[in-house]
Amino acid sequence: MEIARHWRLKAQRYGLVGEVCPHCEVKIFPPRDVCPECGGEAKTSFAFSGKGAVYSYSTIYEAPSGFEEMAPYTVALVKLDEGPVVTAQLTDLGEQPIEIGMPVEMVTRKMRNDGDERGVIVYGYKFRPAVIPQTA
Amino acid sequence: MTEVIIAGIGQTALNEHWNKSLRQLGSEAIHNAIADAGGLQPQALFVGNMFAPNLSSQAHLGVLLADFAGLRGIEAVTVEAAGASGGAALRQGYLAVQSGMVDVALVVGVEKMTDLIGPQNEAALATTSDSDFEAVQGLTCAGQAALLMRRYMYEYQVPSDGFAGFALTAHAHGAGNPRAFFQKAINAQTYAAAGMVSDPLNLFDMAPDVDGAAALVLTRRSLLPRQFSHPLVAIAGSALATDMLALHDRHDLLHFESVQVSTAKALRQAEISLEQVGFFEYHDSFSIFAALSLEAAGFAARGRGWQMAAENALLLGGRLPCATMGGLKAGGNPGGAAGVVQAVEAAAQLRGSAGPNQLNGIRYGMIQSLGGPASTAATHILKKLD
């Protein structure tokens, strides 16, 4: 496992930290330092609220290595309240059916293991059905 | 502008070639293509491949194939653009000949998809997505397609069997192709009974991974051997475009912008309209990709691509024949070789040597090679010369 690679992304994985464009106010996640809308430099950090809604979803049965023990699991495109869409697993679903438009919120969970290499676990964001009331 | 001619075509069967290596598959396709071109000797080799470093622990395919195919010393490199590697390699070969810097270029697509299976294979496939923000969530390539398909079915209210027509079309055409992985037609019941891979995407919404290789010899018309006997097929248009890599970064999830841009550029270069395209070899690694490609290219209105398949418009006798030799779905998906297989098949159609699946009265064919969910699209227009 590439430990430095995951460590570099800790602000994104644990805090959903992206950027806001100082020129056109567009919120950016994941960070790319250049605004995808106006093309201007955009290096101002912005922490997302972690609230959003399911835009699309699917269940993975045939998982890649590192994810086998979690299968089957659900991956969604989550549209954040601030605008951007993120790819993330849905978790803590219980018996609740998933629907497009369902409100969800970010939580920190175990994302994958590294097999039997060094026992390192990658943590990061997943989304669960919203339990904290959504503010308008 | 210089006319770039497809002088030679060669291809292996598309299958699980447990007994053949990368170099054997590649060499077989190369020898077939050079023989087909009347012995023209290439000066440069462009290899389309996406997974050899991952699945076969083998990088440096340019020299590997040049060395083992008996072309030692020539210029040789690998071109990688995920599933569009074959189309991208074709474009590099085309540019080399078109520019006049190379007289005879060899384009080879080769892939060993079956040396690793199961989770390791899924992990390798997922490296074509955004590794830090898609694959790390456990998203697979089939999962990406399923996310698109779910949203598409939701927005356009597509019935659960709405995509069946793509598999039915591909398998009907695969039945006439002796090199296809599946050579048997299927019916709607078979589709409906298929196991779920990543809902709503079932086993018949995705192409099977296969091993295989295909090769093309490209040159200028004036350099063809004196006894060259094939009808002449030229590359009339060539374009490659990219989109955002990750699905979540797209402005419009259900619009394949790279398809729209590369199609428009290729048509403009060929100086033809969309209506003049006699057949379309789309990249049907997933049925939803075929639907979105038909729409972005302009053959169908938004949300209507699936209906072309459902209405049998894509069959050999239909309004726009597609996947005429079975496509990736029935022919098999040989990864980075897929785009070169498309070119071999389209050249055979235009030469009139497509066997039972031969189309009549066609002058132009369009082939399109996608990397990921159209993160890359390489589009070529092939033309039969008078």
Image: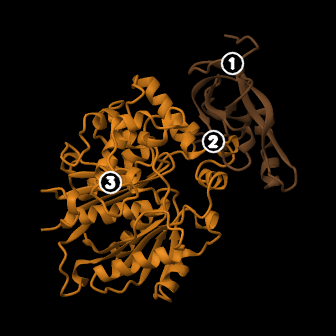
* Amino acid bearing label 3: Gly
Q: Which of the labelled discs sits on residue A95, or is there none?
A: 1
| SS for callout 2 | loop
- Using the image, determine if residue A61 lies above or below residue B11: above
Give me the chain letter of mark 2. B
Residue at image x 21%, y 59%? B356
Lower sequence index among marks 2 and 3: 2
Residue at image x 44%, y 67%? B89
Q: Are marks 2 and 3 in contact (CB under 8 Å)?
A: no
| B79 or B33: nearer the viewer | B33
Place residue A94 in its image quadrant: top right
Place residue A61 in its image quadrant: top right
Percent across and percent down for residue A116 are 83, 54
- Using the image, determine if residue B162 lies above or below residue B22: above
Q: Which of the labelled discs sits on residue B223, or is there none?
A: none
Q: CA distance from mark 2 to mark 3?
A: 30 Å
Mark yes or no: residue A28 visible: no
| B277 or B323: nearer the viewer | B323
Q: Colour of chain B?
A: orange
